[in-house]
Amino acid sequence: MMIEPDGFLPVNLLTGFLGSGKTTLLKRILADAAFADTAVLINEFGEIGLDHDLVERVDGDMVLLRSGCVCCTVRGELATALKDLYSKRERGLLPPFRRVIIESTGLADPFPVLSTIKADPVLRHHFRAGNVITTVDAVNGLRQLDTYIESNRQAAIADRLVMTKTDLAADCDRQALEERLRILNPDAPLLMAADPDLDLSSLADMRGSVSPDSCLSQSGFYCEEPLQLVSAEGVPHQAAISSVSLRVDRPVDWTAFGLWLTMLLNRHGERVLRVKGILNLKGEERPVAVHGVQHLVHAPVHMDTWPSGDRTSRLVFILDGIDGAVVKRSFEAFTLARVPQTPSAASSLAMAAQ
Ligand SMILES: Nc1nc2c(ncn2[C@@H]2O[C@H](COP(=O)(O)OP(=O)(O)OP(=O)(O)O)[C@@H](O)[C@H]2O)c(=O)[nH]1
């Protein structure tokens, strides 16, 4: 396999606010033959359900896929993960991948992520900034831009903007979001995730360059100047964001759970930035993945298998200005109750979260 003539491997950053569809897009990318020689750094393998595609586990945090991609979980420092990746490539322990894609967490400020490469004396000899690809959710995107500075930064720095969930959004919302994105970032091509002809290989920077400085990302990633952020309602505030993880050992009743979650989001959806989890449901062999973003609850998805031997139901909430302990208490009241089957029982439990 050809190695880039200069050895500088582009590092593309896939970013976007909580629940905006990064992992969904990454799954499409991993399935595309054009990305065969890509190394992907993600937060969790489990999230993207790699089981079918797995050829080999290189070590606990690194797997090889049938497509030729290498996938690694980032635990701890990004710089360490990249160095490890490069060193394994050099020693022939991994295929000679030609580009990297990092999926960042939804609240990540994109600047420090890639400036890591510039700052690190070892990394900057092997890697350079590729494209920043930002997913923006057509349903929640405008409100997120109004409220969260991270969302503005992610959109403003993008080399490619990908609007997701247009199938769920009203035309006027989509248009308003499009206009806002044009103001924030007039140069980046705005692509639609729902477009069946979306050319995935046009998203990432696929090839190495002659030198890192001759091919800065379009957003001027290395620029030290603070970004000019534009928002219809002024500069968004820095939120009081926290997360809470919930676990339950015994199988969960779907109807009761659905009621509890619906009540919670009806009441507090604005401040529930993200909920995601995997549930062991009564009467179901396979796990069910649940996703919610503010008021929007996505259709639950039956996963093929459990990602590991752990069959505990797990949920993570990312909250803005709600006490996680209160959500936890409410959830525990729900799971400890003798399966509330009626709306009134579930609603009284959901009210406990107020
Ligand atoms: N209908 C619809 N659902 C989508 C689309 N893109 C993503 N989703 C759903 O949105 C939910 C969140 O998607 P993810 O890909 O997990 O979002 P994410 O940005 O990786 O989430 P975090 O990493 O938690 O920030 C899932 O239920 C997806 O199936 C889309 O274009 N249309």
Image (cartoon, rainbow, N blue to C red):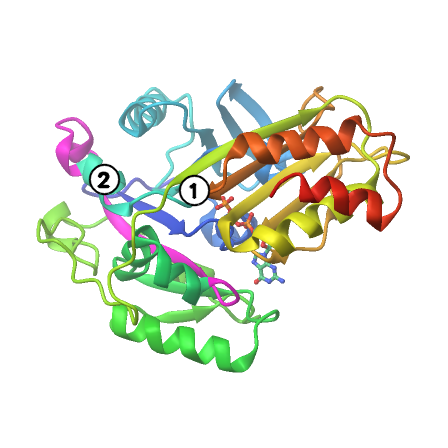
Q: What residue is disc 1 on?
A: 37
Q: Nearer the viewer, mark 2 or mark 1?
A: 2
Residue found at x 77% / y 30%: 335
Q: Residues within 10 Å of mark 2 (few under 14, many from 20)?
A: few
Which quarter of the rendering shows the N terminus?
Answer: top left
Residue 48 percent across, percent down from the top left: 58, 40
Which quarter of the rendering shows the C terminus?
Answer: top right
Q: Residue 111 appears in which quarter of the rendering?
A: top left
Q: What residue is disc 2 on?
A: 112
Q: Nearer the viewer, residue 325 or 181?
A: 325
Residue found at x 61% / y 71%: 167
Q: Residue 78 appears in which quarter of the rendering?
A: top left
User: What's the CA distance linking mark 2 and mark 1?
Assistant: 26 Å
Q: Could you say whether the residue bearing mark 1 is in a helix, strand or loop?
A: loop
Residue 28 percent across, percent down from the top left: 55, 53
Residue 143: tell me if it is visible.
yes
Q: Residues within 10 Å of mark 1 (few under 14, many from 20)?
A: many
The residue stretch that appears in magenta: 118-140
Q: Is residue 221 magenta?
A: no
Image check: 168 left or right of 322?
right
Image check: 313 left or right of 316?
right
Q: Confirm if mark 2 falls within 8 A of ligand 1.
A: no
Residue 108 percent across, percent down from the top left: 34, 42
Q: Amino acid at mark 1?
A: Asp
